[in-house]
Amino acid sequence: MLNDLYSYLIQPLLSYDFMQKASVSLICLCLSAPLIGVFLTLKRMSLSGDAISHAILPGAAVGFLFSGLSVTAMTIGGMIAGIVVIIMSSLFSRASKSSEESNLAVFYLFSLALGVLIISLNGSNLDLLHFLFGSVFAIGSETIVLLGICTTVTLIVLSFIARPLILDIVDPLFLESVSKSGTWVHICFMILAVFNLVSSFQAIGTLMAVGIMIIPATSAKFWSYRLTSILVISVFQALISSYVGLIMSFHYNVPCSPAIIISLSTLYLVSFIFGSHKGIIKKFIKGKHYEN
Amino acid sequence: MLTFNNLTIGYNKHPVIHHLNMHIEKGTSVAIVGPNGCGKSSLLKGIMSFIKPMGGSITIDISRDKIAYLPQSSTVDKTFPMTTLELVSSGLLYKKSFWAGLNRDDIRLVNSTLEKVGLKGMADEPLKALSGGQIQRALFARLIIQDAELILLDEPFNAIDYKTTVELLKIIRMWIDAGKTVISVLHDLKQVRDNFTYTAILSRELVAYGLTEEVLTGDNLDKAFSNSFYPHKDANICNK
């Protein structure tokens, strides 16, 4: 029995090089992307992750055109496209006092259209699928290094900007009254989001990377009211789902990225029902009320 | 401490305050009174540099970190996972380095300040559990923690019950007694008479400024409240 469990759950990770590379990549991704997701959802910008993931497409496509499937070229291209889109939408929204999400929608759609045009003129539909859904079992050492750098940079920068970032969300006028850092902290944070999405597209694709960012961040809020706990729970949920997705993918020959996202969604449903802070069951249990 | 030099502030080329000349001494308490839309809040935003003057200037002889500001309506996101203690301590933390957290003395200070504003035992309560009045008390606690020399309050008792108002007014008097400069936009003239030494009556332009008992007269108030404040599309260009 134990041997069966071992050969089913552990052995694949120890026996195959491609499984080890996939595991390390996913661990890196899970240590940083959910943290970005928690702050994105608190900023009420959950769908911005989705928008940015589309926005980086033309940059990655141009990188692909110049250097084929080179991680460096596509990363640099994607970063440039993503950063241009978030800075333009931030500046346009602040200059016109209009919503950042609506400006982001305009820029990302333009960027996406440009990306599809570039790919269709010079590549094939297969290339586009690679961008969107990744191929975690074909991951190279270059991508693992990139993900490692991304995680390290994310953790260091987030720890530096956490305080003004939190104030910018919870009381932006107070931050503006005591410091001029609000805009820069916001842009810095959005660049981190771009970096995470760009570096994850080789592993699980840009579309699925948004899932690792946003889904655990949303389900963690069903379990706790403390920001630190929410951050930790979201990372754990991402790690568990990635492991389950990886094992499912290995044994049943299904694509890994969707398997991870379906695991995350299942955990979301479990959190929604059983969550100790805001779970639906807790709301239905009516005990005796307090005196005051 | 604070001088307005021929200051004009407004939006889309239409002024809400026109050619204001006024000087506020250090350690004074000034109430700003006037009808809705006459530029009271805009004046405070101008002091905070949230809006740039269309003309003239504002001279402040203290550094920006010595100014504390409470806006008219709170922008606090009550759904954010944060406790009362964390909100109040933000008045302290922005002064600290990135890595420095709260030490024991800081927590003791925050807890004693919460007690001063009537929020004893509420330190660990999440923001979403606080009422409007309790949020306002917490924001006053943060102002105390900020320990600023110039305190700007924009209609601090909007939608606040009588008891809370009385208790928060005591804190304003505590600041005044401690020699801080307090400038507050208020609508309740009794609160102005009872608590503020100086009053400025605004009605797009300065109607009167001086000792409260001399300025707060029927004539001045009639003059202030008789104007309308809608920007006219066909208004003439100002040549002052």
Image: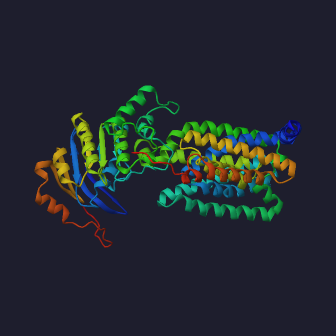
Q: Nearer the viewer, residue A145 or B141?
A: B141
Quadrant of residue A180 within the rendered picture: top left
Query: Seen from this angle, which residue lies furthest front?
Result: A288
Quadrant of residue B104 within the rendered picture: top left
Query: Seen from this angle, which residue lies furthest top?
Result: B104
Q: Is residue A46 visible?
A: yes
Rendered view: A74 above or below B37: above
Q: Is residue A66 left or right of residue B90?
A: right
Q: Is residue A203 left or right of residue B128?
A: right
Q: Nearer the viewer, residue B170 or A167?
A: B170
Q: Is residue A246 left or right of residue A163?
A: right
Q: Nearer the viewer, residue A68 or A291?
A: A291
The x, y position of residue B169, in whole percent, is 25, 44
Q: Is residue B109 left or right of residue A132?
A: left
| Residue drawn at point x = 65 percent, y = 64 percent | A110
The x, y position of residue A126, in whole percent, is 83, 60
The x, y position of residue B45, in whole percent, is 34, 51
Q: Is residue A83 visible?
A: no
Q: How many marks?
A: 0
Q: For the N terminus of chain A, which image quadrant? A: top right
| Residue drawn at point x = 54 percent, y = 53 percent | A283
Q: For the C terminus of chain A, which image quadrant? A: top left
| Residue drawn at point x = 51 percent, y = 45 percent | B81
The x, y position of residue A90, in whole percent, is 54, 55
Q: Nearer the viewer, residue B46 or A10?
A: A10
